[in-house]
């Protein structure tokens, strides 16, 4: 499979701190790629650079565009990166706390007629689209067993549901690439496996995932390829079975 | 003791109520929905008032064959001429009114749009202070800008319905116009926000970064919100100039902004109906205090201060018992709710 995302020699320095120091990774289309590493190894910084929150100090980020060629996306704003087809979730979930669960999910779809100021006051122009989106949203929420919470506010949800909802919110668009930052943190084992099963199903439908996760027990059963970061550099990469047996990885995780 | 003129009181109160309602509703759009801490509300009100006043006075003179540059509207001669000429022709008066409202909307809206540029990269507190300072800058500029009368401002602005003859009737017609604009603002804002757009505004308010990550053009959304809010405030300003028939820089002090904030907070952030109730309470209290305080014989403290003490007390008491204001924010009404209900009832048994 051709790559959908490539990061080449990517570096991000904060003063003297080298959060990322020359990382090269590639994510093939229709794959689930894991990104693991101890705390502070640069996983979230990598996400932040790819999604436009930081400009890289060095290196470039390339994304496959609709015409099939690789296009540089470093230096774009986060909203532009999203519109290119990249969705991300956050380690500490960032939900819209005063909106209901349904409303949270409905914020995501990009081209909403009713978000345009000249169309918004005229319900007839966007009602059809709104109903279709609502159908899709409720369908997704049901799939993850959250139909009971459709009208709940975020403040009434458990941590696990909040995590789950952020991922569901990301699924409301027809993006090509999903960057999920610890989707299974704080989610119970059964729900975590369900979530990953669903992710695998979406992969079959043509989506691609790059996932940061500390729950290796769950992650390793689902990923096709794993990158291990340590102190801003790539420590190891390979198929899950290779990586977990790599002595360097074991040392970095367990310490030494 | 003078006889209490109930009709006169009501017309006066409702007109002020109307002007402030427009400001409060639009501030609620900006602050309650989009999370923009607009401490510069008075800027846009002031721009509208000055645009309306300047256009009306200069054009009244010019169209009556008086050269407004020879005999400017802020000079004694100009004021005498304005009193003599103003408000005689219905078509001219209405034409100037319409022109002023339109120009006030565009001018105030554009300034609001442009002012989002300096505030894009800063947090809510700095947005507030930037806009607050801009208001003071504008006031100081106006005090020293001769063509709009400097510190004396512009006076004898012809009333748009002066040609009716009976002053009570013309005030009443003017009141209807103000209330019409309030209704327009209220309906427009409700329609605008009970939509995916309102959802997007609230999303930006709740978490700008998350909204950005979901592809929302946050700077553009803020600029648009300030354009709309400021444009309507500009129209309220133009009406205010006609109502008082004069404008001067010291009408546009930061206290005006904070009054509007107090009304919005009291009524409930994110709820337009609440804002209207907040305005009604405040303006009514204000008018009543203006009547009552002299009768109480309190001469040591100026009625102005008593009013401010009351405002503070009222906010503290209401927020103690109702932290979200009199009317709390409600979930937006879009067809999604209805659609979800249908789906959940049909598939109630689970998949």
Image (cartoon, grey):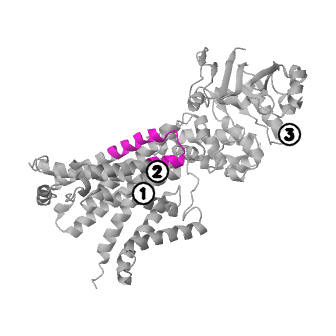
Label 3 near label 1: C-beta < 8 Å?
A: no
Q: Quadrant of the C terminus of chain B?
A: top right
Tell me if residue A39 comes above or below residue B336 in the rendering.
above
Pointer 3: what residue?
A189
Give residue B301's position: percent from left, percent from top.
40, 76
The residue pinned by badge 1 equals: B257
- The residue segment tinted magenta is B106-130
Q: Secondary structure at mark 1?
A: helix
User: Residue B35: in sight, yes or no?
Assistant: no
Q: Residues within 10 Å of mark 3 (few under 14, many from 20)?
A: some
* Nearest to the observer: residue A107 or residue A63: A63
- The Cα–Cα distance between marks 2 and 1, rounded to whole angstroms, is 9 Å
Q: Which residue is mark 2?
A: B38
The residue lying furthest to the left in this view is: B65
Disc 2 crowd, CA 10 A, few/some/many (<14, 14-19, 20+): many
Q: Are marks 2 and 1 on the same chain?
A: yes
Question: Where's residue A114, x and y in %?
Answer: 51, 41
User: Which residue is at the front of the view, B98 or B251?
Assistant: B251
Horizontal arrangement in the rendering, residue A245 relative to residue B188 (left or right): right
Binning the other alpha carbons within 10 Å of mark 1 as few (below 14), some (14 to 19) or many (20 upward) gives many
Residue B192 circle label: none
Residue shown at the point (27%, 61%) measured from the top left: B243
The residues tagged by marks 3 and 2 sit, at their Cα atoms, a distance apart of 46 Å
Whether the magenta-drawn stretch holds residue A115 is answered as: no
* Picture quadrant of residue A143: top right
- Chain bearing tag 2 is B
């Amino acid at each position: 499979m051709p790559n959908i995302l490539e990061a080449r020699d990517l570096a991000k320095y904060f003063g003297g701190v080298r959060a990322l120091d020359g990382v090269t990774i590639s994510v093939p289309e229709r794959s689930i790629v894991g990104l693991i590493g101890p705390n502070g190894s640069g996983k979230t910084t990598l996400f932040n650079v790819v999604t436009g929150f930081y400009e890289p100090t060095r290196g470039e980020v390339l994304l496959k565009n609709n015409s099939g060629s690789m296009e540089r996306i470093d230096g774009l704003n986060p909203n532009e990166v999203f519109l290119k087809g990249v969705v991300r979730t956050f380690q500490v979930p960032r939900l819209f706390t005063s909106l209901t669960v349904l409303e949270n999910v409905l914020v995501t779809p990009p081209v909403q007629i009713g978000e345009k100021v000249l169309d918004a006051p005229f319900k007839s122009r966007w009602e059809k689209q709104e109903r279709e989106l609502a159908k899709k949203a409720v369908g997704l929420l049901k799939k993850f067993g959250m139909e009971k919470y459709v009208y709940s506010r975020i403040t009434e949800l458990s941590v696990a549901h909040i995590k789950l909802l952020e991922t569901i919110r990301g699924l409301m668009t027809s993006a090509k690439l999903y960057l999920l930052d610890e989707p299974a943190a704080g989610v119970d084992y059964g729900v975590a496996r369900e979530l990953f099963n669903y992710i695998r199903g979406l992969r079959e439908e043509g989506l691609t995932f790059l996932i940061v996760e500390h729950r290796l027990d769950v992650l390793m059963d689902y990923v096709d390829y794993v990158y291990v970061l340590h102190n801003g550099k790539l420590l190891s990469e390979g198929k899950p079975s290779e990586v977990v047996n790599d002595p360097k990885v074991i040392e970095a995780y367990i310490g030494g | 003791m003078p006889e209490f003129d109930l009709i006169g009181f009501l017309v006066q109160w409702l007109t002020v109520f109307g002007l402030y309602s427009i400001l409060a509703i639009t501030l609620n759009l900006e602050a309650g929905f989009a999370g923009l801490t607009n401490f510069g509300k008075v800027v846009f009100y002031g721009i509208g008032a000055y645009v309306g006043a300047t256009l009306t006075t200069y054009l009244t003179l010019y169209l009556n064959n008086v050269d407004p540059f020879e005999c400017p509207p802020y000079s004694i001669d100009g004021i005498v001429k304005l009193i003599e000429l103003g408000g005689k022709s219905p078509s001219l008066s209405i034409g100037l009114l319409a022109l002023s409202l339109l120009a006030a909307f565009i001018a105030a809206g554009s300034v609001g749009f442009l002012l989002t540029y300096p505030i894009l990269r800063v947090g809510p507190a700095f947005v507030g202070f930037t806009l607050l300072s801009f208001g003071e800058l504008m006031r100081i500029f106006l005090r020293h800008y001769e063509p709009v009368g400097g510190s004396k401002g512009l006076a004898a602005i012809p009333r748009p319905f002066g040609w009716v003859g009976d002053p009570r009737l013309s005030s009443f017609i003017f009141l209807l116009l103000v209330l019409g604009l309030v209704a327009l603002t209220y309906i427009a804002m409700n329609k605008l926000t009970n939509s995916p757009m309102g959802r997007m505004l609230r999303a930006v308010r709740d978490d700008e970064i998350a909204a950005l990550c979901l592809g929302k053009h946050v700077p553009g959304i803020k600029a648009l919100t300030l354009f709309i809010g400021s444009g309507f405030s500009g129209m309220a300003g133009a009406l205010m100039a006609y109502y008082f028939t004069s404008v001067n820089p010291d009408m546009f002090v930061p206290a005006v902004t904070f009054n509007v904030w107090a009304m919005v907070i009291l009524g409930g952030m994110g709820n337009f109906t609440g804002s209207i109730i907040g305005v009604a309470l405040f303006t009514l209290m204000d008018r009543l205090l203006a009547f009552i305080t002299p009768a109480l014989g309190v001469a040591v403290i100026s009625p102005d201060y008593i009013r401010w003490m009351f405002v503070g007390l009222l906010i503290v008491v209401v927020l103690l018992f109702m932290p979200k204001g009199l009317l709390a924010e409600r979930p937006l009404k879009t067809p999604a709710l209805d659609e979800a209900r249908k789906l959940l009832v049909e598939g109630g048994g689970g998949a």
